[in-house]
Amino acid sequence: MVLIALASVKVAYAQGRGHLWFYSQDPDTLPGPQPLPDPQDYDPRYVGIDPDPWLSESVVVPSSDWETPFSLWLGCAQFESHDTMLVVSINVAAHDVIESIKVNDASLGPWDNSGDPPGCLAPHGVFNSAEFWGYAEINVGDLYSPPGSPYKVEIIVDIKLHEGAEVPSDAKIHFDAYGSTGGSRPRCIFSPYSHDFTFRIPELPVGTILGLATCIAALAAFRYKRMGPGR
């Protein structure tokens, strides 16, 4: 199956009061300040500015490391985030080929096509892009700043494609997160618009597909001739 999909995760400062961060791996396994190092400085898969807002300033998992389901990590680096909502956005190309997305074994939906971000998220690159199709969100629980527990959570994403779908190279999935701080005067805490997570599904070249099809057809013809009809 010809396929390239991309998943992006947004991480941001909540009005300068606190912040949620995403990682390509368990943050406790990364170097730098523990237990939550800045992914921009310490996640080995972080890349810089890119013209594509779905990819710019992202933690990028290369296509050679693709598998599904896959894990990403969300941590609360300051204050606390109650009823943390994971916001999953897809573009038009992804909508055309993805049958379903599950987060921690829960199916996403319904999808909102309004283009208006949910909760306290502000309009930004992904929501403003011409290729944006819609988003769905799911509650991933409460998070607390270290050494509170839990201060991080593993999020497992499982993507199911339409059977036989030929996936275009620009199919993308994107993640944001937001919640509410505790106390008598709770504030919004969310992921800022400078640290994304991008997940790539490798594309199988057309030549490779044709070559495999030719080999299979040739093998089938050889077996037919060898065995003879009716056997």
Image: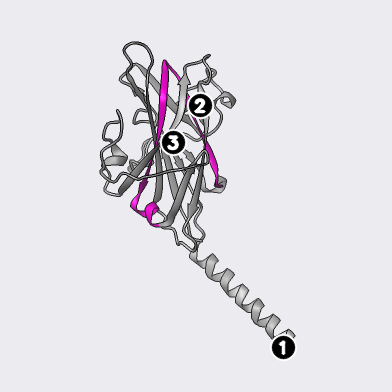
Q: Is residue 26 above or below residue 208?
A: above
Disc 1 residue crowd, few under 14, some 14–19, many 20+, Cα 10 Å: few
Query: Mark 2 falls on what kind of element?
Result: helix
Q: Is residue 163 above or below residue 85?
A: below
| Identity of the residue drawn at 30% across and 20% down | 15
Q: Tag 3's secondary structure?
A: loop
Of tags 1 and 3, the one toward the viewer is 1
| Quadrant of the snapshot with the C terminus | bottom right
Which residue shows up at 70% across the image and 88% down it?
230
Q: Quadrant of residue 224?
A: bottom right
* Mark closest to the chain's N terminus, 2 or 3: 2
Residue hosting label 1 = 228
The residue tagged 3 is: 47
Report the label total: 3
Instruction: Please state the horizontal and vertical placement of residue 181, each as a whole percent of the image.
Output: 37, 18
Q: Is residue 161 left or right of residue 129?
A: right
| Amino acid type at mark 1 | Gly
Q: Is disc 1 placed on a helix, strand or loop?
A: loop
Q: Mark 2 and mark 3: span between their CA atoms?
A: 11 Å
User: In the orientation shown, which residue stands out farthest toward the bottom?
Assistant: 229
Rendered view: 65 above or below 203: above
Q: x, y percentage for residue 104? A: 52, 38
In the rendered view, does 198 fall on the left or right side of 220? left
Q: Is residue 1 magenta?
A: no
Q: Main secondary structure of the magenta part?
A: strand
Magenta span: 67-96
